[in-house]
Image: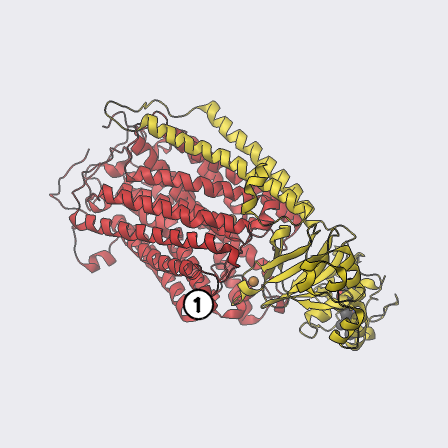
Amino acid sequence: MLVDILRSTLPMAGSDVARDWDAFYAFLTWTSTIFFVGVVAAMVIFTIKYRHRAGHKADTEVHGNVPLEIVWTVIPTILVMVVFVWGYALYRDMVTAPGDSVEIKAIGKQWLWQFQYDDGRSYTNKVFVPVNRPVKFIITSEDVLHSFFVPNMRVKKDAVPGRYTTVWFEATAEGAHIVYCAEYCGTQHSGMLATVYAVSPEIWRRFIQGREIDENKLASGAADEVTMSAAATESKGGAERPISLIDQGRGLVASKGCVACHSVDGKQGIGPSLKGIHGAGVDFANGDHLEARDLNYLREAIEFPNARLVKGYGPMMPTFRGMVSETELTAMLEYIKSLK
Amino acid sequence: MAHTSHDGENYLNHEKGLWSWLSTIDHKRIGVMYLFTVLVFFFIGGVAAMLVRAELFRPGLTLMTADTYNKMFTYHGTIMVFMVVIPLIPSAFGNFVLPMMLGAKDVAFPKLNLASYYVWLAGALVATASLVVNQLDTGWTFYTPYSIRTSTSASWVLLGAFIMGFGGIFTSLNFIATIHKLRAPGLTWGRLPLFVWASYATAIVQLLATPVLALTLFLVVLERSTGIGIFDPKLGGDPVLFQHFFWFYSHPAVYIMALPAMGIISEVIPVHARKQVFGYWAIALATFGIALVAFVVWGHHMFVSGQSELANFLFSLITMFVAVPTGVKVFSWVATLYKGDLHFRMPLLYAFAFIFVFTIGGLTGVFLAALGSNVHLTDTYFVVAHFHYVMVGGTIMGMLAGLHHWFPKMSGRMYSEGWARVSWFLVFMGFNITFFPQFIVGSQGMPRRYYDYVPEFTTLNQISSVGAWIIGVGFVLMALYLLHALFRGAKAPPNPWGAATLEWAQDSPPPFHNFDKDPVVTHGPYDYRTSH
Ligand SMILES: [Cu+2]
Ligand SMILES: [Cu+2]
């Protein structure tokens, strides 16, 4: 009920987390309102009772009241701690993606959003996700800072060049959800919009089988109309099916010459084998230790190989900074990830 | 205690001519010079704000291109933050009243004080020149790598801010030395006006924070000249590191802006409520509490920047504690009204406006300090509304309370109470009409720094723009009645409000040499039993 009154000040809640967010927001708003009304009411009452008029004098003896001062220090302290704990718990839910999430890469660049699926398909300023399944976006930027913001899901994360960040949500409402860029990025910052289309399980099933979705027909519903037939998809996208990210990555690791120094089957070469490194720990020449090699570590190893040398190896690897594009890097990392 | 032994001689007329002003080492004149210069910048920044709001009256192109718009909000933000809100109260009102409040002839180092003005002015001119020449469009936050790529001017503005910071350091050193060394006999620490406590805390924050700005600037310049990667990922640098440096200075800067305004409110309320301030020591300690916490909360600006989860946890936790001393202050001010004798003259009206808007600013700060709620609200208009409620609502309303409180002392004239009320009403209403809708449009998802927006946001943006023009009219009216008062206003008595602090214990305007007879303090700053 208290949440409902505030509904008009919020975008539609497109996920369960968004609904939790709204509840927290309602709590904050109503508690703040009580405080604010209290302060203003006191000012109004004092104005009426103690305004200057003939014969009225101030009581100059009042200059403090220790119990009262303790009360108005302790109560806010308790309240802000409640706010902190609640806010932190909500935040954990917002940032911890379930393990079985559908993974989509999002790359921000001046001034568009590029989305990439593992099967190699990629879209500009639109992305399809299934309802009732967690979806995780691996975000980066090709140039300056951007921020991936989906108000209906109440999530936002900066797209930082040279680094991966993540955002996840599980849409419960089918339909179109707007994506804004929320970090200032120049001329077209406010035009850097995209749309998340949350589609039914049936349409999603067809989509991952390779059919294309006609987002203009989504509102009408029927899966047959929305997804183009396999034949139509073929003719539209040309004869060749897109190459999956892993396959693209395998090709790049070969063509960029990585295999001259790195095996992919566990054998040591000039450099360590790439097999099984993602997620595993590593020792560095300088004595440091990393618990688990994640995407951010791996991209650093490729762009700035000498930043942290793997123990037992020399500074032999040339830098590939500027020689691989953001999409190529994504594909290579996807491939290295797959070498289990 | 007021005496007129100089036959109308005062600090304004004892020497004449432009040069006598430009070369003055009198703290009162330096304060007036700061006030005048800052108000000029306030006017320029205000015009930029009006243009920004005009552009946003409709989605799409209304008045100017996206690039022009981006420059406009950059000018507005940079000028208002660095040239107006930071120096306004300490340098203008601090310089004018602080030495007199202490019963001192001047600040401890009068020549350094004049130097501070010129250093600050030089910095302000460097920053302004580079804004105009380089057409800076980065926003006042200069985030890398955008600021590295667009143009070189971000380093020039940073340089300007740093030079201005030096002016601030000089002023701070002066205040600290003056407070320690030049207090009148009998003016014990427990009898210091709360504005002095606030100025003291601000001075410390300014001394400690400004060098970080220097360091950031140094690193930006180093990166440019040698190509070693610090902030630019293309060079192997870390763009998020720049945000750390930037906010390590700029968060404390928020308190450089807010604390002095709180000091003014602590001064104005007792005087016009004719009552001891409620909880003197609680307010003084809360001031230092806020100043201390100010240094360890900067990361709350970066919850979605990709900084570590541990950092997010800690910064959110610590930020929560800002709310407690802030609350203590608000409650104490309101409690001061209890059993008072409230004279609703302009300073008290502005103090009421301050409490009203600042409370909203503070409470919405909690929305942003909590991690979960922050994620959706950060970088939207909710943040824009929040910091305007704190910075305009806080600092500017506090400044206006101070301006109307000390105007008779500074100018020796009274302003028209009637017109002042009309202007107060316009500024207060206009402010809320402008910024309250921005909380809603922000919650609905409109990001900040948007030239264009989806049609659903039109109504709220139009209300906001109309509000901005109402504020504009309010300020124009204020300029008119204050100018009128300067030339035609009734002569001000030495102590029109019956205040008990020392600046009122001499003529209005004060004589060139403060206090012919050295004052001796025998009572607290808000003890009105003996006076009127
Ligand atoms: Cu952007
Ligand atoms: Cu801050």
The answer to whether residue B282 is seen in the rendering is yes
Instruction: Please give the residue where the numbered disc 1 appears in the rendered image.
Output: B68
Q: Position of residue B465 (x, y in %)?
A: 41, 55
Viewed as shown, does residue A119 lie left or right of B229? Answer: right
Q: Residue at coordinates 48% horizontally, 70% vertically from top-left? A: B152
- Residue B137 lies, with reference to residue B116, above or below; the image says below
Q: Quadrant of residue B287?
A: top left
The amino acid on which the numbered mark 1 sits, given as a three-letter code, is Thr
Chain of the residue on which disc 1 is drawn: B
Considering the image in quadrants, where does the N terminus of chain A appear? top right
Viewed as shown, does residue B364 lie left or right of B494? Answer: right
Q: Quadrant of residue B189?
A: top left
Q: Which chain is painted in red? A: B
Q: Colour in which chain A is shown?
A: yellow
Q: Position of residue A195 (x, y in %)?
A: 64, 61
